[in-house]
Structures are given as structure tokens and as C-alpha cells.
Image (spheres, rainbow, N blue to C red):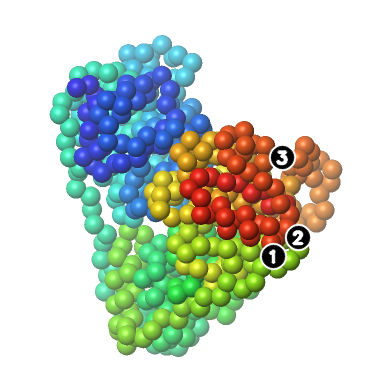
Amino acid sequence: MNGAESLVRTLIKSGIEVCFANPGTSELHFVSALDKVGGIKCILCLFEGVTTAAADGYARMTGKPAATMMHLGPGLANGLANLHNAKRARVPLLNIVGDHARDHLVHDAPLTSDVEAVARPFSAWVKTASSPDRISSDAAAAVSAALNPPGQVATLILPADIAWNEAQEPVGLVQTPSPGAVDDQRIAEIKAVLDRGEPTLFYVTGQAVTEVGLQALSRITQATGADMLTPINNARLERGAGRVPIERLFYPVDMAVERLSGYKHIVLVETREPAAFFGYPGKPSLLAPKDCEFHTLSTPGEQTIDALEELAKRLGAQNSAPVTSPFDPGNVPDGSITPDTFGAVLRAVVPENAIICDESLTSGRALFPSTHTASPHTWLQLTGGAIGIGLPLAVGAAVACPDRPVISLQADGSGMYTLQALWTQARENLNITTVILANRGYQILRGELKNIGIPEPGPIAAGMIDVDNPVIDWVSLAQGMGVEAVRTGDTRELFDLVQSSVKRPRPFLIEAQL
């Protein structure tokens, strides 16, 4: 067998089941090996930002890495923004990036670049394969690195000659480290803080916002009077009726500072000290009171659930019932679609066990609190702040969970970054309902202008943040890529459209005019 076949066989032995691909010439031996060996579901994406975000969504829903296939340094560069989001989401993800044959590199062909240098800022593990006989062990090490708790981005670079030359038999998966135990002293410290009865906040993400983690937190906060909050964006949240509700820390700096005022202690659970997204003139970067003390219960990659349950036990709260949200779908209001009325529609229409991929940005800030009492669902968010994740994130979630309906809430401006994902949705016949929140501009930037002291943009600035000249026709764009689409500005019609769409095993797009 050649190196590419050895690589594919090793990936299969290591548990890789899906590859989101955008190949070029240097990856064609790998493409041929995927065809010859079989065993890996291959999904074509028309842009590398789609491949990386789709692999992110797949990992969030399965806990396992998918592979991506990208073409040389420029192809990898196209996918970096969503690798940044995947890195922030702490998911396992494996990139296979082709490179020129080693003896061709000296000729500085047009696509030659330093692929390792491109990969390193967004990968925890990077290696260029050096021998066909070692490609199997390199691949196993890459998968192992991706699975290093809690999950991380690994990038294996495959020179073309290593793919085509003869190779040895593949090896199995290299052993992956297990999550580390939380030091008992930390649990004792948090217990002592809570016993003092001073205003305390648990600031949590990761395993702490799983269904089991939130149940333990509910028991702890009931027993102590402490509060809990999560960052504005999380990789995954289990929400809705029957689950413990948790609010997010506000995005605007002034609101966040006010929300955190008065706390004497903040317990960090897989989080860092709350900080503003950006620095602003005359506003703080750190959001907590200056006299607030921070205490770390667990860090990413540690056994957070065990630590929370042990803390609840020491507080005598291990058997108390967690406080969960009731089921209350509310009523669908009549009239035009606004951010508030859209929240009411979503609460009423979300089907049980749905997956919501949220890149609604400005128009979606009211969606989160309004859906606490919706049917039980999973919520995926923009973790790293690099917009353009929503449409392909939904692809990965739908591939991971073909039995669950996916609802993609997409801002119109950021949707243009990776609209090629619609083509993949159609090609794979995925059950994804996309709702484009069409407010005709980068409205979040209007708020940012106010934050830096510019309440009303001038004509040049306004032209940089509006996308209404010409108006983007999302219905035509979707139909041009094989996705059925309609437009509406009415709340009841939106409800009916979403309700019917989630029951059909194919993609559908709704342009909701705000």
C-alpha cells in the first residue's frame, strides 16, 4: 500500500468516521485512498471555512474528532477563522493538510508556503509527516493529540510524495490521556469560601454546563445562596424544559460590570476571569469588582463533574432536587418579526431534542432567555467570536445526529462568510432549517460605534456597516445551491414554516425580514 492508504487505514483504526473535505492536486492520492479503502464518510465542502466549522459542529455533538482535508497553506488559511472558534470551543478536531512533494519545495512553485507556520497559532499539535513508513504512527499520534482532554485541534501535514510512495502496515490508536482529577484542596477551599456566606458567583462553562453539571450546580447554589452565570458564548448547552436554566454574562461592558458588582468571590469552573470582548476608551477590560477574590475549582481537561458532585456532597446537598425550567411554550404573537417576537416564535416552535446553532448576533440577544421554557434542546454557539460559523456548524451537527432536527439561527451579514455550506446541506440532504435574520446590516457594529463614542455614523462609516445596497436575496442564493427557500415578515407564518420544515428530512431556508 502507499502512504495515503496507510494513513486512511490508521484513521479508521483510530475511530475517524467522517472527513469534511476541500481537496486539491496534492491531496488526490489521499482522495483515491479514501475511495479504495472505504470506511470513512466523505463530505465535500466548497470552502475550507465550511470544512473546519463542520468538523467543529460534529465534534461538539459526538465528542469525537472528524478529519478535515485542505489544500496546502492557502487552503488551510481559508479555514483558520473557524479553527479559531474550534480551538476556543475545546473540541477534538484533526486537520489533514496536503503539501508539495518534498523535492518540489525547493523550486518555490506558486502555491508553496510554510504550512506549519500557518497551522501553529490555531493548533495545539502540528507535525509534517517525514516518511511513508512513519505516516501511520504520525496519524495515530495526531488523533491522540486531538483527543487530549478536553479536546484540541491537531494538524498533520501530508507531503504528496509521502502519500504516493510505498508504506508499512498501519498501527492503532496511541493511548490518550484521561481527564485529571481535581485537587482535593481546591474543593476544600471552595467549601470554606461558601461557608463564609459572602456574595459568591460560580462562573462556569464546559462540563459544568452539561445537564449533569448544571444539576450539581443547582444543588450547590440552593444550599449556599450563591449564584451561577456562564460566558456569553459556549460550545454546547443543554437547555429547555426539565433542565436547569442558567443565564449568560452580558456582552455590553457596562451591563456586565453592573451584573458582577457586589460579588466578593467568583469561583471559576473551566473559565477565566471575566473580560470584555474588546478594550474601549474609559471602560475596564476586566469586568469583576477590583476587590473580588477568584477561586479555581477546575480547569479544562479536569474531572469537573466529579468535583462539583463532591462539593455538593460536602455541603450536604447531594440529594436535593435541582431547580429546573417548566415547559411553557407560550403563545405566538401576531404581527411583524422583531427580535422579541422572534424569541416568542422560537420558544413555541422548537421541537423536542432539536439542535440549535446560534449565530444570530445582534438580533438574537433576546432569544436565550425567552427559550428557557421551550422543549428540551441543545444550543451551540459562536465560541471564538470569529463570525461565519453558523451555517457550516449546522452541517456538522446534522451529520453527527441525523435523527435530530437542526435549526440554524443566522445573522444575514455573517452568513455571507460561509454561505457555501448551503450547497453541502443540499448535497447531503440534511435536516437543517436555516432562519436568516435579515436586518440588512452589521448591526452589532452600530453598537460598537456607540461604545467608542460615535452615536451616529457618518456616510462613509454607515456604508461600511450596512448590507442593503444592493439587498442580499437569500431566497435566490439558497435556491441557487439547491435549498428550498421562502421569505416572510410575519410571525405566524414564520411559526408555520419552521414547524413544517423541521419534520422534513431535507434543508430549508427562511429569510425572516426584521
Residue 269 position (above or below residue 482): below
Q: Residue at x 71, y 39 (%)?
A: 473
Residue type beneath disc 1? Thr
Say whether disc 1 or disc 3 marks the residue closer to the N-terminus: 1
Closer to the chain start, of discs 2 and 3, is 2
Q: Which residue type carries mark 3?
A: Ile
Q: At label 2, which amino acid type do we have?
A: Ser
- Element carrying mark 1: helix
Distance between mark 2 and mark 3 Cα atoms: 20 Å
> For mark 1, what is the residue?
341
* Residue 232 found in image quarter: bottom right
Disc assigned to residue 472: 3
Q: From the viewer's perspective, is 409 left or right of 108?
A: right
Q: Where is mark 2, residue-wise?
A: 336
Q: Position of residue 289 (x, y in %)?
A: 57, 73
Q: Name the side, left or right, on which 487 lies relative to 256.
A: right
| Residue visible at 37% across and 76% down in the picture | 216
Q: Could you tell me residue 499's position as x and y percent?
A: 57, 58
